[in-house]
C-alpha cells in the first residue's frame, strides 16, 4: 500500500542538514519545477533517511519542489512496473545487477552512462559493474552491506571456541555448541530468502564465485555434481541438528530471540540485524562477526546486496533527477546516510568516511580487502525473479526435508530449461 504522499517544498528549513548549503553550488545551475521520487525505504530508520534526503536536497534548491512518495518495500516489488509505465516519477529506488535487468530490457530505466563517463560520479568504481548492463550504466548505488556470521562472543568464550577459518573448524565448533545444549544457528525461513543466503555462501565456498554466477545465469544444470556437492556440505549441518527447529514458521525477525536468549549461538544474516540485536539488549561485547569460512580452494566471494536509485525513462525533470543522483552518491552524503544513526550500512563511495562502528568497520575491511572472489548481490537478486522464487522454495524444502533433494533438483532443472530459453 502507498503511504500518504510527503510533499517537501524546496524552501523547507531543517535544523540539521546533511551537507552545507554551499554544496549546492557543486551541482551546477539552480533547479526548478517538480522532482517526483518514489522510494521503498518504508521501515522507520530508512524512511527517516529518505525523508531527510529529499528535504535537504529541496532546501539546496529553493525553486524546486520535491515530492516524495514512500511505499511499502514488499509491495513495491509488484508495483514498480506499473509505476514506471503510467505517469512515471523521475527517480525510484530499486536494486543492482540482475534485478534491474527487466526494467532495462523494457526501456523503463534511463541510460545514465554519460554521468559516469563525464566524471560526475567519482568514487563508484568498485560498484560500477553492478550498475552495468550491455556496457551501459542504468542507475547509481547508494548503500550496500555485508553478510556473514554474527555470533554470541560471550558463548564462544564460555565454550573456549575461536572464530573458524575453515568449514571443518565451523563444524567442530558446532558440535561443541550442540553438546552444550544449544543450537548452532538460528534462522527464520518463513519468507524463504534467508535460506538463499546459506546456499549462496555454501556454493561460493564449495565451487567458487564464478561457478555460482554461472549457475545464476542458467549456464549450469541444477543436477550438476558440483551443485550436489554444495547440498552435501549443507546437509552435514542439517544432519547434525545445527539449525533451530521449525525455522520455516519464523520470519527473520522472529528468529532473533533464539540468539538473544542464547538458545542458538549464531545467525548467517546481513548487517541490518545488528540494530535489532542491540535493541534486544545484547551489547557489542556479546556480539561479534566473522567471514563465512573457507571450504574449497577458491577466492572468497561475498554477498553484499546493493540498493540503488534510477531515473525513469519517462522522467519529466531529468536535470533535477541527475542532480539528485549526484547528490546522494557524494562522499559527504554517503557517510551520513550510511552511518549508525542512518542506515547502519556501508557507503559505496570509496571517498566516504566509514562510521566508527565495530560491524561497519569489519564489513568494510572484509569487502574491500578479503572479497577477492567477487561481490554477489544475493540469491533473489542474482537469479532471474521466477528462478529465484522457485529456487528459494526448493532451498527451504531441502532444509526441512533433505531427503527430497533429488526431486528438488529435478524441479529446479526443469524450471531452468524453461526460464532461460
Image (tube, helix red, strand yellow):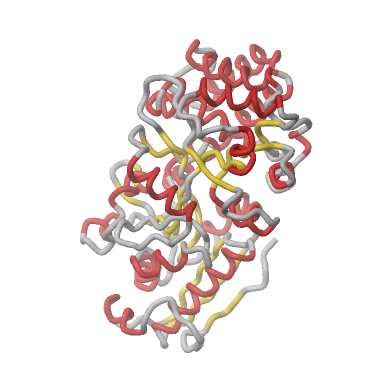
User: In the rendered image, is residue 421 in sight?
Assistant: no
User: In the rendered image, is residue 151 in sight?
Assistant: yes
Total numbered labels placed on residues in the image: 0
> Residue 1, image x and y in percent?
70, 61
Towards the viewer: 394 or 349? 349
Q: Quadrant of residue 51?
A: bottom right
Judge from the rendering whether residue 395 lies leftward or rightward of residue 10; answer left or right.
Answer: right
**In the image, residue 248 above or below residue 421:** below
Towards the viewer: 163 or 61? 163
User: Which residue does the image show at 73% across and 38% down from the upper left?
Assistant: 190
Judge from the rendering whether residue 200 lies leftward or rightward of residue 325; answer left or right.
Answer: right
Towards the viewer: 409 or 316? 409
> Residue 296, image x and y in percent?
42, 19
Q: Quadrant of residue 300?
A: top left
Judge from the rendering whether residue 290 lies leftward or rightward of residue 129; answer left or right.
Answer: right
**In the image, residue 270 above or below residue 112:** above
> Residue 390, image x and y in percent?
63, 29
> Residue 109, image x and y in percent?
42, 54
User: Which residue does the image show at 49% across and 61% down from the upper left?
Assistant: 92
Residue ranking furthest to the left: 118
User: Which residue does the image show at 32% across and 49% down from the upper left?
Assistant: 128
**In the image, residue 78 above or below residue 173:** below
**In the image, residue 172 above or below residue 326:** above
User: Which residue does the image show at 46% across and 44% down from the upper left?
Assistant: 304
Amino acid at each position: 500500500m502507498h503511504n500518504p504522499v510527503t510533499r517537501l517544498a524546496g524552501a523547507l528549513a531543517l535544523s540539521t542538514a546533511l551537507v552545507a548549503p554551499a554544496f549546492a553550488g557543486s551541482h551546477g545551475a539552480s533547479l526548478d519545477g517538480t522532482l517526483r521520487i518514489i522510494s521503498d525505504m518504508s521501515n522507520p530508520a530508512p524512511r527517516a533517511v529518505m525523508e531527510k534526503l529529499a528535504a535537504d536536497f529541496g532546501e539546496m534548491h529553493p525553486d524546486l519542489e520535491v515530492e516524495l512518495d514512500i511505499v511499502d518495500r514488499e509491495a513495491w516489488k509488484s508495483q514498480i512496473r506499473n509505476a514506471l509505465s503510467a505517469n512515471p516519477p523521475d527517480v525510484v529506488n530499486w536494486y543492482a545487477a540482475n534485478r534491474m535487468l527487466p526494467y532495462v530490457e523494457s526501456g523503463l530505466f534511463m541510460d545514465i552512462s554519460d554521468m559516469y563517463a563525464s566524471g560526475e560520479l567519482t568514487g563508484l568504481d568498485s560498484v560500477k559493474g553492478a550498475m552495468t548492463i550491455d556496457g551501459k550504466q542504468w542507475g547509481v548505488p547508494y548503500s550496500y552491506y555485508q553478510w556473514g556470521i554474527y555470533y554470541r562472543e560471550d558463548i564462544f568464550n564460555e565454550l573456549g571456541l575461536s572464530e573458524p577459518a575453515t568449514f571443518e573448524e565451523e563444524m567442530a565448533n558446532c558440535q561443541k555448541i550442540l553438546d552444550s545444549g544449544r543450537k548452532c544457528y538460528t534462522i527464520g525461513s518463513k519468507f524463504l530468502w534467508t535460506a538463499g543466503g546459506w546456499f549462496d555462501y555454501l556454493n561460493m565456498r564449495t565451487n567458487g564465485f564464478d561457478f555460482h554466477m554461472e549457475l545464476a545465469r542458467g549456464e549450469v544444470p541444477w543436477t550438476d555434481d558440483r551443485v550436489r556437492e554444495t547440498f552435501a556440505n549443507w546437509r552435514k549441518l542439517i544432519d547434525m541438528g545445527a539449525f533451530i527447529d521449525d525455522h520455516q514458521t519464523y520470519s527473520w525477525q522472529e528468529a532473533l530471540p533464539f540468539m538473544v536468549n542464547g538458545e542458538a549461538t549464531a545467525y548467517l544474516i546481513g548487517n541490518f540485524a545488528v540494530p535489532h540485536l542491540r535493541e534486544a539488549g545484547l551489547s557489542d561485547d556479546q556480539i561479534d562477526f566473522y567471514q563465512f569460512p573457507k571450504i574449497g580452494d577458491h577466492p572468497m566471494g561475498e554477498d553484499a546486496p546493493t540498493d540503488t536509485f534510477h531515473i525513469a525513462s519517462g522522467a519529466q525533470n531529468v536535470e533535477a533527477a541527475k542532480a539528485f543522483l549526484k547528490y546522494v552518491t557524494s562522499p559527504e552524503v554517503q557517510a551520513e546516510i550510511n552511518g549508525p544513526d542512518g542506515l547502519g550500512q556501508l557507503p559505496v563511495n570509496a571517498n566516504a568516511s566509514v562510521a566508527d562502528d565495530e560491524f561497519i568497520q569489519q564489513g568494510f575491511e572484509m569487502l574491500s580487502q578479503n572479497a577477492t572472489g567477487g561481490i554477489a548481490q544475493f540469491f533473489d537478486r542474482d537469479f532471474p525473479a521466477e528462478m529465484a522464487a522457485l529456487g528459494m522454495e526448493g532451498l527451504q524444502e531441502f532444509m526441512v526435508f533433505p531427503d527430497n533433494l533429488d526431486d528438488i533438483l529435478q524441479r529446479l532443472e526443469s524450471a531452468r530449461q524453461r526460464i532461460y530459453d
